[in-house]
Amino acid sequence: MKRDTLARTSADAGISLLTFAVVCFAPLTVGAPLTWEGPFALGAVLGVLLLLRRRVPGTVLALSALVLLVYRTTGLYESGWAWPLAPALLTACAAKRYAVTAITVFVHLAFAVFGEIVFFSTSVPESVLRAGTEALWLGLPLALVTIRRQNAQRRAQQEALREQERRALLAEQRVEISRDVHDVVAHTLAVVGVHLSVAADALCADPDGPGVDVDAARAALDTAREARGAAMAELKAFVGDLRGVPQRGLTEIEALLDAARQAGLGVEVGRNGDLAAVSAAQSLAAYQVVREAVTNTLRHSGADRLTVRLTADGDELRVEISDDGAAASPVVPGHGLTGMRERVAAIGGSVEWESGDGFTVRAVLPLGAGGSAA
């Protein structure tokens, strides 16, 4: 902060000294004498005023314009009607003091024409020529300010656009993370819930009676604990995905189905076609579809059997998961089914589901849409 303040102060002092020097010695170019009450006094006044240009740019320009008019009309200064105001004019324009800037330019250019004729008996053509020169002196800094402001606005717009894109990307990433966390947690809770129910059923009889099945309860609790451990491993893998570690795919589907078997489901799997040629993006999407379908079966349907079919046929991968449980009709999709549809749609695929004699999910994923082989 102190360094910036020192830099601004040094720049202001340099501009003031340069203005003083130019205003003092410019009359020599037209053969006018250098006097203390003329060029030196005007240069000193304009230089001192410029020290305040950042605080009160409009006031500095107005006072500088008034002083210059007095010196020019009284003959104390004979070099220019407008160009000595260039630094003050530049600052006022940059500070958006457009009214005082426009008035100053108009008045001084008018005096550059008519003042020369009235006060110095200059011919009309020569007065117009001098006014054109003065206009050039004023137009150059104004053009520089305009270009600088346009560039600044363009940079600001580009930065705003980049910020919008960044926010949109973050929003998409948050949605994707929420889907993945939902899938992992929901699937694990479904598996654990089933086994806790089994354990509770095994222990619900009279503790002293023959109906208690401690071994079954222990096995169910062990399976629930294993599901919890698998969920922790999957969450770690998910964090690894965020860090760039390869994501899950078709090869991990068997682990999902093993968990379903341990939960008491009879699982049938069918694989057809060259599944090894499925790209990473499609492989991940297929895994997520199967995981969500298995989770829904465990949580909602009360099914006894689950069938999974994976078919790579031509330019598409078809995934079908069906169970024989009781499904609600019509099906109201929750976060899981909605997230599954969004994931598949993101790679150009489609998902549909239906309930009838059980619940069936069908997904069609286009092949060859990017990613490496799974």
Image (cartoon, rainbow, N blue to C red):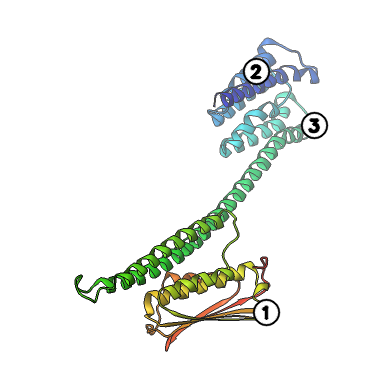
Residue at the spot 38% in from the left edge and 74% down from the top edge: 299
Front residue (pair 192, 164): 192
Residue 95 against residue 294 in the figure, above or below: above
Which residue position is annotated with label 1? Answer: 315
Q: Is residue 359 visible?
A: no
Determine which quarter of the picture holds residue 311.
bottom right
In three-dimensional space, the C-alpha distance between marks 1 and 2, rounded to whole angstroms, equals 84 Å
**Element under disc 1:** loop
Q: Is residue 304 visible?
A: yes
**Disc 1 versus disc 2: nearer the observer:** 1
Determine which quarter of the picture holds residue 47.
top right
Q: Position of residue 117 (x, y in %)?
A: 73, 29
Which residue position is annotated with label 2? Answer: 42
Residue at the spot 59% in from the left edge and 52% down from the top edge: 162
Identify which amino acid the numbered label 1 is placed on.
Asp
Q: Mark 3 or mark 2: name the one nearer the start of the chain.
A: 2
Q: Is residue 194 left or right of residue 179?
A: left
Which residue position is annotated with label 3? Answer: 126
- Looking at the rendered structure, the number of numbered marks drawn on it comes to 3
Front residue (pair 226, 292): 226
**Element under disc 3:** helix
- Quarter the C terminus occupies: bottom right
Q: Is residue 335 left or right of residue 138?
A: left
Q: Mark 1 or mark 3: name the one nearer the start of the chain.
A: 3
Q: Is residue 17 left or right of residue 309?
A: right
Front residue (pair 159, 147): 159
Identify which amino acid the numbered label 2 is placed on.
Leu
Determine which quarter of the picture holds residue 283.
bottom right
